[in-house]
Image (cartoon, rainbow, N blue to C red):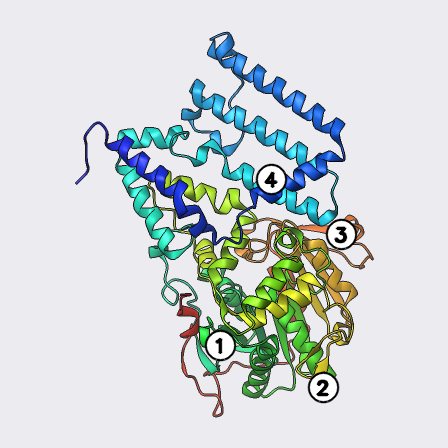
């Protein structure tokens, strides 16, 4: 029963404040993605010491602006003299127009602008500057008055209207999120893998300790002779490519007449903590290609890799070429890095001390828990993926809306620590993969230049995980005919853009250029989704049309269980 005493809202707010200011932030932040305030101040001081004149100018102007703002509210006593409501979406509600809260919002925005200008003026090397910019933005986002129960007028009004019940609900939401270690971004009760996500019919036709391989049922009377093997990122569940029927990339490919095989990576238990990058190649990607060849009785398949799945696929193709094999007719890379010279804001987290620490941590095995990576990626867009949900879930006590993509985003996958440490050092830290022969994998030297089959390379213009210019560098590394396409939007929305919705746009260019921006200058923009453009390209490599198979698998690889299989349903622990 709701406590309706006059102090109930106040008491509930006090309890919420104690939890938010206690260990909630550390537990929800995982300790890895939160900014180090001391390091930030050290970097800022070092950078401004090289430009003291600019520092004095910025501070003088900041103090004048804050004084003018205070006078606008308090000096004349007339609300009409106050600045117009901020355009910032966090302060659009009518409640923020009350003088006190309007002042808080404007003062905060002045401080945010001051910090950003201080950061921009700091003279530091590229890596230090990027860290400072990230830490500054992270701190600015975190300190918004909208994020605290005592300074958010919408939350205060709701608490008063519900006699504190909204805050009691918020406390329960916060406690539940602390228990699972993630901020809830969607109503997780609205979705279930196999019920309303990953529902494209098919069967598991092979499994080992690393993956299950799904074969989907055809939707056309005839199919292309060569099947398509999809390799999703191993740090997430595969069903980002098969969310619901109206936004399923898998279903789109099947409807275009392709027999699709999907790698479903295992959510690794502690016992698999010593598994290596080579294991993922040998028992994952290359095994999936071989099984698809056998089931479809073809010498070659087409292959597709998404994000880290694309990096794994490229390594596997280089290994196969070094072994004298050529089982792939064409390859598609979706938002994939092969050159790691500029990894964007992820470089903030990966430096020599960090990699050395992770190598020591996983020297004897162990797993990297998926929620740590999920929090790291969310922190890159904290104002979109963290703080709105803090306000909605905890301060207002509401349940987030059902959103399939955000459900997938929270359904993380554990990785073997040994494999993760190898990946960090040889890609993000040392960028060894782009150097021919620098790395040996599965006993042979890796040279991406030997990947000489036709390739479709897709990047996303607002991608904060795989910067599009970095993805463009793939065109310098591969040895075959290349087709580069740039999609609008970000890492996920740029890829998952169903043709039927006719949203966004994409760019194509006939001739590759040495520089990414030069290519874009000459590229043509096309409305809508890139999906039909890709299927038209892929059809050239599908082979002759044949009668669609009536059943999945064959005598050597009989169906083991219906899609989506067990592995994808295993939750991180």
Residue 479: give x, y in percent of width and height.
78, 72
Q: Is residue 389 left or right of residue 476?
A: left
Location of residue 287 (image quadrant)? bottom right
| Residue sitting at x 63%, y 29% | 114
Residue 281: give x, y in percent of width and height.
61, 78
Name which of mark 3 and mark 4 comes first in the sequence.
4
Name which of mark 1 and mark 4 comes first in the sequence.
4
| Residue sitting at x 46%, y 31% | 145
Q: Secondary structure at mark 1?
A: helix
Q: Secondary structure at mark 4?
A: helix
**Quick one: 494 or 277, which is closer to the camera?**
277
Q: Distance from label 3 to label 1 (Cα)?
A: 46 Å
Determine contact: label 2, label 1, CB under 8 Å: no
Provide the residue designation for mark 1.
Answer: 272
Q: Is residue 147 visible in this depiction of the protein?
A: yes
Name which of mark 4 and mark 2 comes first in the sequence.
4
- Mark linked to residue 136: 4
Give the tally of numbered discs. 4
Query: Given this view, does label 4 or label 2 mark the residue nearer the observer?
Result: 4
Q: Distance from label 4 to label 2 (Cα)?
A: 49 Å
Q: Distance from label 3 to label 4 (Cα)?
A: 35 Å
């Amino acid at each position: 029963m709701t406590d309706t005493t006059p102090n109930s809202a106040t008491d509930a707010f006090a309890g919420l404040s104690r939890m938010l200011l206690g260990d909630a932030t550390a537990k929800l932040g995982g300790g890895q993605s939160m900014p180090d305030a001391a390091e930030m101040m050290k970097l800022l001081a070092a950078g401004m010491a090289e430009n003291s004149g600019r520092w004095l100018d910025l501070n003088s102007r900041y103090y004048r602006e804050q004084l003018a703002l205070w006078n606008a509210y308090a000096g004349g006593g007339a609300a009409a003299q106050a600045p117009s409501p901020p355009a910032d979406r966090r302060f659009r509600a009518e409640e923020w127009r009350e003088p006190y809260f309007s002042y808080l919002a404007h003062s905060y925005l002045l401080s945010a602008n001051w910090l950003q200008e201080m950061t921009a003026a700091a003279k530091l090397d590229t890596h230090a500057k990027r860290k400072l910019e990230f830490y500054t933005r992270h701190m600015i986002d975190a300190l918004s008055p909208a994020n605290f129960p005592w300074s958010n007028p919408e939350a205060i009004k709701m608490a008063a209207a519900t006699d504190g019940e909204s805050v009691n609900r918020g406390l329960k939401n916060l406690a539940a999120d602390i228990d699972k270690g993630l901020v809830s971004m969607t109503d997780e009760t609205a979705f279930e893998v196999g019920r309303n996500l990953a529902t494209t019919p098919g069967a598991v036709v092979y499994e080992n300790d690393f993956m299950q391989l799904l074969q989907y049922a055809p939707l056309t009377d005839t199919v292309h002779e060569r099947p398509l093997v999809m390799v999703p990122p191993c740090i997430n569940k595969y069903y980002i490519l098969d969310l619901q029927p109206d936004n399923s990339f898998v279903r789109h490919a099947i409807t275009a007449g392709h027999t699709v095989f999907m790698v479903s990576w295992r959510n690794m238990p502690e016992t698999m903590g010593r598994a290596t990058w080579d294991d993922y190649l040998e028992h994952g990607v290359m095994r999936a290609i071989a099984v698809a060849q056998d089931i479809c009785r073809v010498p070659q398949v087409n292959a597709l890799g998404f994000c880290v799945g694309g990096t794994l696929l490229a390594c596997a193709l280089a290994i196969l070429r070094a072994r004298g094999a050529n089982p792939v007719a064409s390859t598609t890379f979706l938002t994939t890095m092969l050159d790691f010279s500029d990894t964007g804001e992820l470089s903030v987290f990966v430096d020599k001390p960090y990699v050395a620490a992770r190598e020591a941590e996983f020297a004897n095995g162990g797993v990297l828990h998926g929620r740590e990576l999920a929090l790291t990626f969310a922190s890159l867009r904290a104002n979109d993926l963290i703080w709105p949900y803090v306000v909605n879930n905890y301060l207002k006590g509401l349940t987030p809306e059902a959103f399939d993509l955000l459900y997938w985003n929270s359904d993380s996958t554990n990785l073997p620590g040994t494999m993760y440490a190898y990946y960090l050092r040889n890609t993000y830290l040392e960028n060894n993969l782009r150097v021919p022969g620098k790395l040996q994998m599965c006993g042979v030297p890796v040279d991406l230049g030997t990947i000489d089959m036709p390739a479709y390379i897709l990047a996303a213009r607002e991608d904060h995980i795989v910067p599009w210019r970095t993805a463009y560098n793939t065109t310098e590394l591969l040895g075959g005919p290349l087709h580069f396409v740039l999609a609008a939007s970000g890492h996920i929305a740029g890829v998952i853009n169903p043709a039927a919705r006719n949203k966004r746009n994409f760019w194509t260019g006939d001739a590759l250029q040495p520089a990414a921006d030069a290519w874009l200058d000459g590229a043509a923009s096309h409305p809508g989704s890139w999906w039909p453009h890709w299927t038209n390209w892929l059809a050239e490599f599908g082979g002759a049309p044949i009668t669609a198979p009536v059943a999945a698998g064959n005598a050597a690889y009989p169906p083991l269980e219906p899609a989506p299989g067990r592995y994808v349903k295993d939750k991180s622990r």
